[in-house]
Amino acid sequence: MAEEKTAAVSNTAGSRFSKAAKIYFKENLGIIVALLVLCIFLAVNPLTSSSFLTQKNVFNVLRQISTNLYLACGMTMVIILGGIDLSVGSIIAMSGCVAAGCVSRYNLPLAVALLCGVLVGLVVGMFNGYVISSTTIPPFIVTLATMNVAKGLAYVYTGGSPVRVVTKEWQFVGAGYIGPVPTPVVLLVIVLLVTAIIMNKTKLGRHLYAVGGNAQAAEFSGISVAKVKFLVHTYSGIMAGLAGIVLASRMYSGQPTAGDGAEMDAIAAVVVGGTSMAGGSGKIGGTIIGGLIIGVLNNGLNLMNVNSFWQYVVKGCVILLAVYLDYIRNKKSKL
Amino acid sequence: MAEEYLLEMKGIHKRFPGVLALNNVSLTVKAGEVHALLGENGAGKSTLIKVLGGIYIAEEGEIFIEGKKVTIDSVRASHENGVAIIHQELVLVPYMTVAENIFLGREPMKGRFVDSKKMTDDAQALLDANDMHISADTLVGSLTIAQQQMVEIVKAISFNSKILVMDEPTSSISDKEVEFLFETMRSLTAKGVGIIYISHKMSELEQICDRVTVMRDGEYVGTRVVKETTKDELIAMMVGRELTNYYTRDFLKPGDVVLRCDHISDGRMAKDASFEVRKGEIVGFAGLVGAGRSEVMKCLFGLTKNYKGDIEIEGSKVQIHNPIEAMKYGLALVPEDRKLEGLYKVQSVRYNSTIEVLGEFIKGIFVDGAKEEEITQKYIDMLSTKTPTQEQLIGNLSGGNQQKVIIGRWLATNPKILILDEPTRGVDVGAKSEIYAIMNELVKKGMSIIMISSELPEIINMSDRIYVMNEGNITGCLSRDEVSQEAIMKLAAN
């Protein structure tokens, strides 16, 4: 019922949207409806209605989902390629610890420290990309290995305890504001724009879909399959490095336990966003909605004081439901 | 019912959407004979075998085994009726032993556990009984192709199969191994097994086969006793269709040589190919599947690393290392297997049309969407591709329209020499005729086309000259006056 109504609304309003926006809504109709239903539920539910739609809470949700969406930007491209990147969670830990260490142990300037954090991600990403593009070892295995190595190095570097940084400037990236907007959200907008431009406006973006959709055909087209794989995994690493410094900044410390399981949330956002694990198709626009659904759901469960153990259960069910609805829709459109 | 036949298939009809794949086909096999099934590619041999194997179910027709009418509606039913098929691609599990493969799914049990010892012993007994010097506990992956075939045969015998189908078993094994295979086949027929033998190699017929059935265009042509027929008669039966007149071709005088290839070889499938192509000419490449035609073109297009031989384009010698360089020299290749090598199935017609010429409308991060649409539309119009919109996913178009999009994709690169590898495979008759007309237009404008095709009428009617390949070598070049289906088949089957 809800779906039909929204379809009608988007049709009448359609004339005002540009052609691209129309396609965007059509492609993502299912998850947009799911997100709206979730928001409406939280806005009218007496338990949450007083707090959910406040400016503070909205920015809070956006800040919470920002790190996940950085990862998801890289992950979307990796999954379109037909691969997976399991190492991003561990890169968060490693990059956060290195950045914090640069400040507290070596007294390096903040900007250099943050850059070092991102560089950690870049290097791990390049390594993933190099091995995946020059061998036939599956990305799952390669990134499973680097996931363990990066995590281990983070523990070795810190000796297992957080590297604390207690300066006001340090907090700016993760907990600060630019005007009324939290810094991570500003960064998120930039990251999303850059990713959208790469995916939709560059040759690399086109080649990405070609390699993911049919690597053999891409070879016949003279596309350098290895180069595309290398660049995409490097990008995913950079995104994870960025997420690492933002998280370390928000937590006043680099922690070797940071980012545990973050790769799974990123994969969930991508998959809920309609990108096929088989590769070759998917859009960053879908991933944004996927990330929002997961973020709003987390926020709503917190506002309703749902026991955190049960939150996992609910989250799992919602992911399955979202993907199942998408499966039904695709099946219908194929017949 | 004649009791003399081990297997009798009568009046088999099999329809696929839009095609009648088998039209009233009959096949009889006697106990203890090797019966050859002969026909061009697409004649319906495989379909008939799949009906016998329970993979396809025929709409009409009857099957009798040892005089009893049987219903084969599943692979299991086919096994139960004593039919075993050895496919061209072997279907053994490489990481399991010979014994495990032979008894896969029906392992001898001791209580709740697999009795490995009994399994290995039983398998070894079977191997020994058939004079096969293979140890039952070797991993299948470590055997040669020929040995794996032997394992498949033993597996078939262990089912007590009465009818054994072998689909081109000699296509990938050496002459010596072929000899051993034939010996094994003879010892099987001596035990009363009937063998259906599919092969393209005419010379093997005389060596091993007793009778032969010829199929053409999904129809039964006739059955002959091998000793009482001739190669020429069989070839005539295979190709004897009437040529239809949907070919458009104005033969003009070709221009200068634009491409000369000397002794092209990839060290495997392509052994020695020398040929030349003139401006405004359609040059056909005929031969059987696996003759190395596509492999030669892959060398030419930079898809094969370390090929040997010289390539000369418009008089100057060139080295081609990758497709980008090939495109710079004005080459374009529409690949043989559209699904595997051409289509980006989950992407739009527009995406698929423009992937080779992104540089024409993407500068850095600026995409000229209007230009992109214009290029796409140009080739949709030129090839009269039927698609509702440019955004339509290419996977939803018909085979013919998919092929037109792929041809358009390569025409967009403005090639001087267009290589079409099986351009009309899986394309319906109407679209085929349109593709021929387009080819004619292109060569009239001065383009050169190399066309690989396994369809003899097509290649004969469209080509100025035809090179014939056999086992990696060019065995002849036929001009328009010399060409006939028989002449091509003689050079191709050698």
Image (cartoon, rainbow, N blue to C red):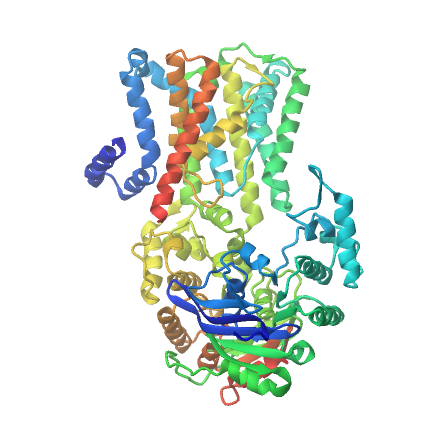
Residue at the left extreme of this rendering: A12
Instruction: Give the residue displayed 48% in from the left and 29% down from the top.
Output: A266
Instruction: Give the residue displayed 37% in from the left and 75% down from the top.
Output: B437
- In the picture, measured across the screen, residue B267 lies left or right of residue B24, that is right
Q: Position of residue B14 (x, y in %)?
A: 43, 66
- In the picture, measured across the screen, residue A75 lies left or right of residue A151, that is left
| Residue A71 in view in this figure | no
Instruction: Give the residue displayed 78% in from the left and 61% down from the top.
Output: B129
| Residue B56 in view in this figure | yes
Where B481 falls versus B74 (above or below)? Answer: below
Where B22 falls versus A18 (above or below)? Answer: below
Residue at the bottom extreme of this rendering: B481
Query: In terms of depth relative to the viewer, which is nearer, A323 or A143?
Result: A323
Query: In terms of depth relative to the viewer, which is nearer, A327 or B123?
Result: B123
Q: Position of residue A216 (x, y in %)?
A: 54, 54
Query: In terms of depth relative to the viewer, which is nearer, B470 or B86?
Result: B86
Q: Position of residue A93 (x, y in %)?
A: 58, 22
User: On the image, which quarter does residue A96 sit in?
Assistant: top right
- In the picture, measured across the screen, residue B273 lies left or right of residue B146, that is left
Q: Position of residue B408 (x, y in %)?
A: 40, 63
User: On the image, which quarter does residue B160 sit in?
Assistant: bottom right
